[in-house]
Amino acid sequence: MQCIELKKDFYYVGVIDHSLKVFDVAVRTDAGTSYNSYLLKTSAGNIVFEGNKGKYEGEYIEHLKKISPIEDIKYVFVSHTEPDHSGAIANLLELNPEITVVASSGALMNLEKIVRKPFKEMKMLPGAKLEIGGYHFDFVSGLMLHWPDVMFTYIEELKVLVSCDAFGAHFASDAILLSKEKDIEGYNKALVYYYDHIMAPFASYVIAACDRVEKLDISMICPGHGPVVDCRIHEQIEKYRELALKCLPNNDPNHVTIVYASAYGYTKGIANYLKKRFEEDGKKVSFYEIDALNYGEVKESIIKDIYSSGMLLLGSPTLVGDAICFFYDILSNIYWTVGQGKKASAFGDYGWSGEAVNNLSERLKQLKFKVIDGYRANFKLDEPQEKALEEYYGRLK
Ligand SMILES: Cc1cc2nc3c(=O)[nH]c(=O)nc-3n(C[C@H](O)[C@H](O)[C@H](O)COP(=O)(O)O)c2cc1C
Ligand SMILES: [Fe+2]
Ligand SMILES: [Fe+2]
């Protein structure tokens, strides 16, 4: 592999892996990936940006050595400490214990637990500036893209933004530079897939980061994965913003989503009552009855409605000591970043033990919804239960 010079004295020293099929357990990678790292030669010592994955520590050191003796590396700037970028740092520090790690306080805290040996460190706050060997570095918060430790580095003289996972893609590109990559369609697909699977839960943070980054005069984005973005910079940032806007929760207080299931019609009766009452009060109600046959078809639409509504109501009878599995599947697609700020409640009918309502309420709390105590009815509603349902509606609205 070539370690190409991206700008004067600024080199690509990453590792490209065409064979990778699965990333972070749950993410498929049809186009492999790369673990990007960069080296800047300065008169006050050489600086490495981003580490590498532990698995590639040997190959990584060979790449660094092609550009600089390890003894000449004075600093490692760490943007994010997920082990795909930090795993190989322990080895680098072992080879040269004089290296100072420059990072956010969160990243240093994590790295101490990843390296498990003392090392020289320099803590930088977001918004801080640093000068080394005639180069000026601005530290830009990348909070929650996708870890709390993330901090980008902007190199003023080179107009380079080192962004780690943000603006990256699992896409092994031997071209290294986006301007030289031929499979742009494949790259775009990988970029969106990466966003959807890694960044989407943090849409509001992505928008905040785009706002910060857009103030900078950038000629090159150097991400942690995939090709170096040396063209269409503004487009790339705007694409990120667009993707984030698409999955930003809305919390419309006039929109209620009711999802229910019912074997014998009792829970259905409760759901219909709630729908009627909300509609009488002028709310828009997205209303779904789910079962084994239709769930697959309506799931996506349910999730969309949950994003946009200010309240979620889940109605499940108790079957075999719990709520029906589809409700847990729905909630496993909702991140806490979506749940927080929304009201939610569970209701449902039962025969003898009635666990569904409490179990769903607990799960909703774990997802940071503002949970309103649920409503349970036992078989056919009698008068007191009907009265209790009315009261329940009063607590919801
Ligand atoms: C397969 C099956 C399993 C059930 N298991 C439980 C249970 O574990 N605990 C309970 O309280 N009720 C249980 N029930 C009873 C239902 O919760 C009860 O019939 C309820 O009224 C159904 O409401 P629905 O008409 O909205 O489906 C079960 C019912 C069925 C059909
Ligand atoms: Fe990461
Ligand atoms: Fe990564």
Image (cartoon, rainbow, N blue to C red):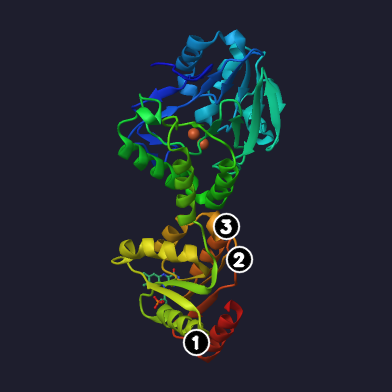
Q: Is residue 88 above or below residue 164?
A: above
- The correct choice, above or below, for 299 with respect to 131 in the image is below
- The x and y percentages for residue 236 are 45, 41
Front residue of this view, candidates 374 and 59:
59
Say what secondary structure mark 1 lies in.
helix
Residue 20, given in percent of the width and then of the height, sits at 36, 30
The mark total stands at 3
Q: Is mark 3 within 8 Å of ligand 1?
A: no
Please tell me whether residue 337 is drawn above or below residue 114 in the rendered image: below
* Rendered location of residue 244, percent (x, y): 49, 51
Q: CA distance from mark 3 to mark 2?
A: 10 Å
Image region (quadrant) for ligand 1: bottom left
- Where is residue 185, by image quadrant? top left
Q: Determine which quarter of the picture holds residue 351.
A: bottom left
Closest to the observer, 55 or 191: 191
**Identity of the residue drawn at 37% across and 80% down:** 265
Mark 3 or 2: in front is 2
Residue at image mark 1: 280
Rounded to the nearest whole Å, what is the CA distance between mark 2 and mark 1? Answer: 24 Å
Residue 15 in picture, x, y percent from top left = 43, 22
Q: Which residue is mark 3?
A: 366
- Residue type of the residue flagged with mark 3: Gln
Indicate which label's residue lies in the foreground, 2 or 1: 1
Q: Earlier in the sequence, mark 2 or mark 1?
A: 1
Which residue carries the number 2 mark? Answer: 370
The answer to whether residue 247 is seen in the rendering is no
Mark 1 to mark 3 CA distance (whole Å) = 31 Å
Q: Is residue 51 left or right of residue 182?
A: right
